[in-house]
Amino acid sequence: MPEKRTPARMDQLRDLVQFVSDHITMRRFPESRRAQVELATEEVLVNIFLHAYPETPGDVAVTVDVTGEGRCILRFEDHGVPFDPLAVAAPDVSAPLSDRKPGGLGILFIRNTADRVTYRRSGDRNFLTLEFSGVSGG
């Protein structure tokens, strides 16, 4: 599976999203789902860039695989602060804007578009895996 490892910095965002986009396009992952995969990639990476390394610089690795069954599997790895996005309560999007806490919408988007999201912490590393079917809506 193709992997790209870079410093976890905002100036790497475009290259990493393009890396994912190039591989899913090359493997003929459906256009109808590509934008969702690319946006989910961006959301995960921005969270890593902004929150994983509050005191020291670090890196991030992105692995992309499109299976013979037409599934896109993205794996993100960092050695930053432990963070399980599945443990975060979903924001109440029905509440008035003035009553909402900031944040959480990116995680909600990922949960709603990916068919499967898994997280594990192993040693000093976070591993987040997103799986997308080639059919819109899962």
Image (cartoon, rainbow, N blue to C red):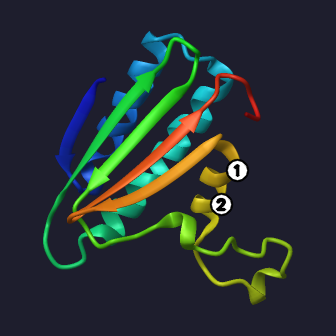
Reply above or below: 135 against 5: above
Return the mark for residue 43.
none
Assess disc 1: are there few (<14), some (14-19) or many (≥20) residues with their C-alpha within 10 Å of its C-alpha: few
Of 137 and 101, nearer the camera is 137
**Looking at the image, is 78 positioned above or below residue 53?**
above
Mark 2 sits on what residue? Answer: 108
Image point (31%, 40%), residue name: 62
Q: Quadrant of residue 15?
A: top left
Q: Is residue 95 left or right of residue 70?
A: right
Q: Position of residue 125 (x, y in %)?
A: 25, 60
What is the x, y in percent for residue 60? 24, 50
Residue farthest along the bottom direction in this orientation = 99
Tag 2: amino acid: Leu
> Foreground residue, 136 or 133?
133
Task: Label 2, secondary structure: give it.
Answer: helix
Alpha carbon separation for disc pair 2 and 1: 6 Å
Q: Determine whether the residue tagged by mark 1 lies in a helix, strand or loop.
A: helix
- Residue 112's disc number: 1
Q: Quadrant of the N terminus?
A: top left
CB atoms of marks 2 and 1 within 8 Å: yes
- Residue at x 73% of width, y 34% of height: 138
